[in-house]
Image: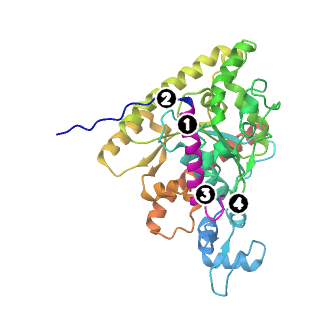
Amino acid sequence: MKLAIAPPPQRVTADDLINMAERASAMLKLIRDSMLQPEPRKEPPVFTSNKVQALCGIDKTKFSTLLKAGKLPQGEQESKGRMRRFTLAETIEWVDATVKPLKRRKKQKGKIITVANFKGGVTKTTTGMNLAQGLTLRRCRRVLHVDLDPQGSSTVLYGINPNAEIAPSETVLPVIDRDDAGLPLQPNLLYAPQKTYWDNLDLIPASSDLFNAEFMLPAQVHQKDATFKFWEVLRTALEPLLDEYDYIVIDTAPTLSYLTINALFAADAMIVPIVPDVLSYSSMVQFWSLLSELVTGMKSFTKGGETKSFDSVDVLISRMPNKPSAQLVNDWIRKTYGSYVNAVEIPETELARTASNDFKTIYDMPDYDGSPEAYRRIKEPYDKLVDFIDDRTCRFWAAEEFEVA
């Protein structure tokens, strides 16, 4: 058999890498614009009457009574007898009036939830996005989503090309290094939130410029006073925003980076998604080991030797397939982490993969026209996760109110 002769190797220069990066960025823009036609920006979903009823937990009779009272949005009806359609903002207003979720009092701070794991492909971005959207839709919360991943995966889900459309000054960089970055002096992140296509959900986007933070933060440790707490930079910068938002959801890179460390130390609560396979399980062991070392290692830098603590930690089993091998790892996870494992499991479904490929989440698709069972199977677990997280936060707010009283 005649062997194929490989072409002579060619050196890959810096210019070649630059050209490759430019082609990749241009291709991403083409793909995104094609997915989001006719306008390269995502649009909020529209909800039919029955979807609004389901979100509000009311039947058709109650819905008709409230509609006739005229105090809630009437939606649009193309013709008599046709189902009404409601915008996202109108739907949230209906949910607020009927579900009546507990309100955070003005003196109470919002909560920061960091979604983290040092392994990629465990649905951190999907989990964070669905949580942020679900909290606004199901619980009428005001939410800020912070993308700390230089790859900008969450930013892309909002229909934004992080490398082509986001400047360094629009990210968290101006509060990380205000001198060497050549950016305007910013004492906090009040400058950064951007409106998105989704009502009550703002975004602090990411771009590849965030890679610079991995040089900026350690440089400040050497340039400034030895007591400089590089791990508290993000928490300090987010603090003023906790008066404006009920939740700040942080998406992190799948690495133990300076930005990820800041996200973990900024968090009131942490969600750690894990896919039930052996590699993910092994990687997660390292995650807890390194995190515990970080927390105890910072003890000597704090007054009185206090250590970092969290309101809650949730290990979230995600992309759970119907396979015996996955169930075995699922059992390992539950035996290892016990009560920290959230009761909700997010199943592996073709619909979830399709939504991701279309730059969508499950909450972007209330008008999904495929199998109702397939849609319910993936949406219901996210609904339960959102409700569980918010119910627990409400208990924290209630306890804080009691302590103040």
Give the residues in magenta.
15-41
Residue at 66 percent across and 28 percent down: it is 213
- The three-letter code of the residue at mark 3 reads Asp
Which comes sooner in the sequence, label 3 or label 4? Answer: 3
How far separated are the C-alphas under marks 2 and 1?
Answer: 9 Å
> Could one spot residue 253 in this view of the protein?
no
Kind of residue at badge 2: Phe
> Which comes sooner in the sequence, label 1 or label 3?
3
Question: Residue at coordinates 67% horizontally, 79% vertically from top-left?
Answer: 64
**Disc number at residue 287?**
2
**Callout 4: helix, strand or loop?**
loop
Question: 10 Å neighbourhood of mark 2: few (<14), some, or many (≥20)?
Answer: some
Which is more foreground, mark 1 or mark 3?
3
Circle 4 Cα neighbour tier, 10 Å, few/some/many (<14 / 14–19 / ≥20): few
Where residue 296 sits: x, y (%)?
Answer: 58, 19
Q: Amino acid at mark 1?
A: Ala
276 part of magenta stretch = no
Disc 2 and disc 1 in contact, CB within 8 angstroms = yes
Quadrant including the N terminus:
top left
**Residue under circle 3?**
33
Image quadrant containing the C terminus = top right
Give percent across and percent down for residue 79: 67, 86
Toward the viewer: 313 or 19? 19
Residue 96 lies in quadrant? bottom right
- Residue to which mark 1 is pinned: 116
